[in-house]
Image: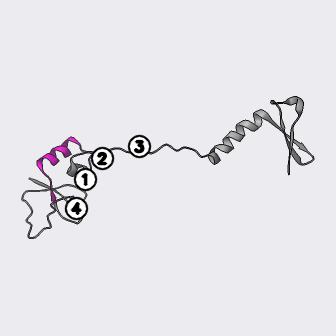
């Protein structure tokens, strides 16, 4: 039996006879396969396919599994961190006082005897 792969056919093709080069485009390498040629798998490639059933056609051809690339962890920017930090800082250290629709911030733990006000529009 001869096992071929073709880029327009999802599965492996098993044939009783070898394809002839006069009536079929036979691929000598992976580039030829990508160009639409039939690629005959060697005994070693078939053994790799049997040992690795989840391997792609390219992995079978190369007889090596592609490494699994782990995505880079997301590192939040300062702009992304700010709302979370403010929601932790403001309730703990700052009292918001509304004086006739004028908002003021009062630091309640740092220097309570100094009553620091910051007026906001």
Q: Are marks 1 and 3 in contact (CB under 8 Å)?
A: no
Q: Earlier in the sequence, mark 4 or mark 3?
A: 4
**Residue 34 in the image: x percent, y percent?**
24, 62
The residue carrying pointer 4 sits among few (fewer than 14), some (14 to 19) or many (20 or more) residues within 10 Å by Cα, namely: few
Q: Which residues are magenta?
A: 39-57
Q: Earlier in the sequence, mark 4 or mark 2?
A: 4
- The residue identified by callout 3 is 70
The residue carrying pointer 1 sits among few (fewer than 14), some (14 to 19) or many (20 or more) residues within 10 Å by Cα, namely: some
Q: Earlier in the sequence, mark 1 or mark 3?
A: 1
Q: Mark 2: which secondary structure?
A: loop
Depth check, front residue: 23 or 33: 33
Q: In the rendered view, tell whether residue 91 sits above or below residue 17.
A: above
Q: Mark 4: which secondary structure?
A: helix
- The residue identified by callout 1 is 58
Q: In percent of the image, x 83 and y 32: which residue is there?
A: 108
Q: Are marks 2 and 1 in contact (CB under 8 Å)?
A: yes
Q: Mark 1: which secondary structure?
A: helix
Depth check, front residue: 119 or 98: 119
Question: Which residue is at the far bottom?
Answer: 23
- Of badges 1 and 4, nearer the viewer stands 4
Q: Are marks 1 and 4 in contact (CB under 8 Å)?
A: no
Marks 3/2: CA distance? 12 Å
Depth check, front residue: 71 or 24: 71
Q: In percent of the image, x 20 and y 52: which residue is there?
A: 61
- The residue identified by callout 2 is 66
**Residue 57 in the image: x percent, y percent?**
24, 53
Q: Earlier in the sequence, mark 2 or mark 1?
A: 1
Whether residue 17 sits left or right of residue 108 in the image: it is left
Say which mark, if any, is on residue 31: 4
């Amino acid at each position: 039996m001869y096992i071929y792969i073709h880029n327009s056919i999802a599965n492996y093709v098993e044939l009783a006879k070898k394809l002839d080069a006069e009536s079929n485009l036979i691929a000598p390498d992976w580039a030829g396969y990508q160009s639409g040629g039939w690629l005959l798998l060697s005994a070693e490639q078939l053994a790799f396919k049997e040992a690795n059933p989840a391997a792609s056609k390219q992995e079978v051809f190369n007889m090596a599994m592609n490494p699994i690339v782990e995505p880079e962890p997301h590192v939040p920017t300062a702009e992304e961190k700010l709302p979370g930090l403010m929601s932790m800082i403001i309730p703990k250290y700052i009292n918001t006082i509304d004086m006739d629709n004028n908002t003021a911030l009062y630091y309640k733990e740092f220097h309570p005897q100094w009553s620091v006000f910051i007026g906001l529009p």
